[in-house]
Amino acid sequence: MEFRLLGTVSVDTFTGPLPLGPAKRRSLLAALLLSANTPVSIARLTDSLWDDTPPLHARSVIQGHVSRLRALLVGADAEAYGVELVTLGDAYVLRLPETLLDSQRFEELLTLARGQRSPADAVLMLKEALSLWQGPALSGAFAGRPLQAAAHSLEESRLATVEQLARAYAALGEHNRAAAVLRAEAVAHPMRESLAAALMTALYRAGRQSEALDWFHRTRRLLADELGIDPGHELADAYALILRGDPGPDAGREGGRNAPDGRGAAARGPVRAGGTGDSGGRDGSGGAGPVPAARPAADRRTGPDGGAAAEPAGRTDESPGGAGGGTGGAPSPAPPRPIPVPSLAGELHPTDLLPRAPRGFQGRTAELAALTRAAAGEAPVCLVTGPAGVGKTALALQWAHRSPAAFPDGRLFADLRGFSDTGEPALIEVLREFLLALGVAPRRVPESVAAAAALFRSLTDRRRLLVILDNARHSATVRPLLPGGTDCVTLVTSRHRLEGLIASDAARPVPLDVLEPPDGTALLAGVLGEDRVLAEPVAARRLAELCGGLPLALRVTAARLAGRPSWTLAGLADELADERGRLAFLDVDDTGVSAALRLTVQQLPQDAVHQLARLGHHPGSHFDPYTAAALAGTDPVVATAALERLAAAHLVTETVPGHWILHDLVRLYARGMDPEGGPEALIGVLDHYIATALAAADTAEPGGEPCFVLPEDYHRPAAVRDFVDRSAAMRWLAAERDDLALAAVAARTAGFHDRAWRIILLQWPQVVWRVRDSWSPLLELALDSARAHDDAYAESRVLNLLGWVLTEEGRTAEAVALLERSPVLARQAGDLLGEATALINLAVVQAEQGGLDTALEGCGRAVELAREEQDAHTETLALQHLARMQLTANRPHEALESVRAALDLGPEHEEVARRVLLLTTSGEARLALGEEGEGIRLLDLAAGEAEHTGYDEGAVRALQALLRVTAEPEYRKRYEQAVRRLTDNG
């Protein structure tokens, strides 16, 4: 367990961060951590949680947050770490070992760094200290005045540490590094003179005098323009040092490499004067050195157009000394040409081991061009990667056959069988085949891999050769097979990303994805003939889509149709549309999608295989580590490692960092790997969605009563995503809307009705935010699931939200019919808060239909029920609607009283919609009382808050009210913009 203040306020555990919820709860935790093991009074916590006058119920709010925080810590087994949140009279104390707090470890590392005699040791300590910072201190918390002061103090300590690190680098003579660490902070804090002075000194000592002077003048102008002051003594002293040309202490370390005048730099390079440095020998000794076999007439090289290409650098007749290398500037005598030695095999002949070019190849124009670009340069290694069946080998061969003249010395090919049942060939056998193709006599082929690889590199050193290494599984398999010549091109294909080859040999990746539908259709036409495809163009496109654009699947489909001329494309498309038999249809003899995927999967470790099998049961379209962990019954750390392995094998695709998808055919294959695990995986992911949506709702609308109790057999995930603030929670709800709907449908289909209606109902913050965004069909599905178990509690809760949505959609008659049943059902279930919410929603409809007195009575009863249950959130909601109805009934004084009572309950900072609507009602009440100035001020404040947070519905309401009393063009413009945003967003 680890507590973080240096960045987002958080509690990290082995299974991920704790879901702390809203900013006020993080503020509470931050205040307790800043005084760890010391009691913190309610009064100080109040100052930390509210900037202005705290609400009347501040103590209750703090107690609620403490209770929730304590439950989170207990659930994370905090006691095992010596962590405990206890109450001491009128204060709270968070007891914990200080080693668990990042700010404390930061201070300890600074103390250790100050005690180091060696600057190198100090650098290590200081870098370790700064690595603890993950963003501005106390991020994600509501910044009350005490927390602002604490964050400022921590930031000052960080900046002082950066300056200390720069001084340590300077003591080592590493002035460029000192400048690098200082520049980033100087840009972020342009008026901190100590940073600017230190940066100027570092730049000057690194030999970058003009940059140092430029930084001084930039800082001087900024101080004059912004503050009207001259530079202080630190900046002035640094400027004077540069003008005097004073190197200062430590400037001459590291052999003078950073000295301002550049002296000492010449000693680093080889001496070339008089032609004695590198006289052309390949071993640098001045002699000919060992050379590979003589190359034939092709040694003059041909360019891509067939003409003679320029001789590579280092092989000309010029002296390496250059213009200044000889006496008086005259060129030195040309070194002798290397003397050819007899070949091991006699004369070498161009060879070609390429398989035939693929037939029916379609599309891939961009990838072919990318390969051509990747093949440019010196000794390039091109890496074609992609999932099984995507056409990697076909692409490589197509490109290789396009321009045979580019490789006059031959083209070699080896299938490394990295994903084959037969196993990989021995490296010595591949090298033996290559050496024999290059003309080496069988008896002269070395027996060891190292010796054979060295001979292969030697023979290819001065040749223009293409080497294709197909189906590689490991980077280590490829390296001994790389040719030695700078003009050789190596093309590797693999289902794995082979990142090791990228790191060690600068391999240039060319990722291969599935075909777009037009290219897929063209591939079918290439096998079946254009007439047959043109006769059924719609069916042909549908087949391409059902095959997921996978060339292997398309070729198998075409093979089935080619052998059955009486079959129609539409008929086969109908067969493939049934997911249960699709993979079986895509197998022919020993070739097919299942076989290709099986060969990939069998190379994976067991944890990745288990993860893939469970991903096949995911009802949604995408997944993150939390979702994957819930499906597999693991935690996000384990799931992330498994997903990385699957991504490396191109079995999952990472669309954006932390989010993956499965190809449809891979999903079907994965589902068949563990069919018995389907129900367990589905329950896991459904309960994950419930837990995450609860955390999102708690952060988006904090303080509210949960919209249901959890199912009896609920399985809490190993870790739940944490949301820093309301916007993050709302973004998640919006991004996951489609997958949450798919999960609800899957739950209902599997008979898990208790999960289906809960997953839908938990989206209520997004429903309220975008009420006109077609929510009723989904809520009707929730209602069916609630009724499936004859659950009065569930039915009442769903009816509440559905009735309100229907009201907002203008379907008031339907809304009344549903909402009239909801309070009765809630009373039957003993759900007083549900009854209060139902009365509020019913009252809204009754008021719209003219039954204002009945509506006022219902809302008043809802206020009473909420107070009985001591639920401030529901009471605020009831008062908000009561105020609106009182205003409609021309009772503005009563409306203002209701608004004040609601605001006194202290809506959380994150409850933007609630606050905006209350301010709007208050402003309209002031207008009704003739207080036009105050009314306009309140309405403008409401509109501004709504616009700032993206609550377009609230902005439209407030600006409409403003336009009824003022013709200000600015209000008209803002109103039209808000309406346009609301329309564009659905």
Image: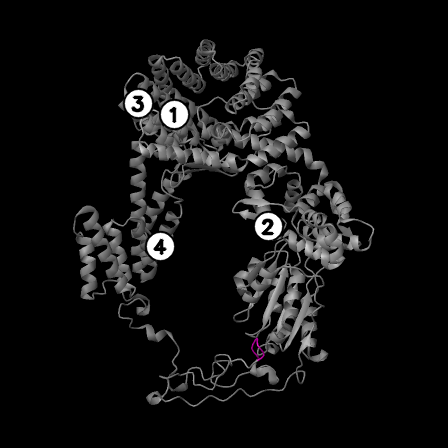
Q: Is residue 214 magenta?
A: no
Amino acid type at circle 2 is: Ala
Q: Indicate which disc, 3 or 2, sits on the residue closer to the N terminus.
A: 2
* Residue beneath the point at 30% across and 23% down: 935
Residue to which mark 2 is pinned? 647
* Residue beneath the point at 66% across and 69% down: 401
Please say if the residues under marks 4 and 3 sit with CB atoms less than 8 Å apart: no
Disc 3, SS: helix
Report the magenta residues as a range.
302-306
Residue to which mark 3 is pinned? 935
Q: Indicate which disc, 2 or 1, sits on the residue closer to the N terminus.
A: 2
* Residue beneath the point at 40% across and 83% down: 321
Residue to which mark 1 is pinned? 915
The span from disc 3 to disc 2 (Cα, nearest Å) is 58 Å
Residue 174 visible here: no
Q: Is residue 724 left or right of residue 718?
A: left
Amino acid type at circle 4 is: Val
Q: Which mark is residue 123?
A: 4
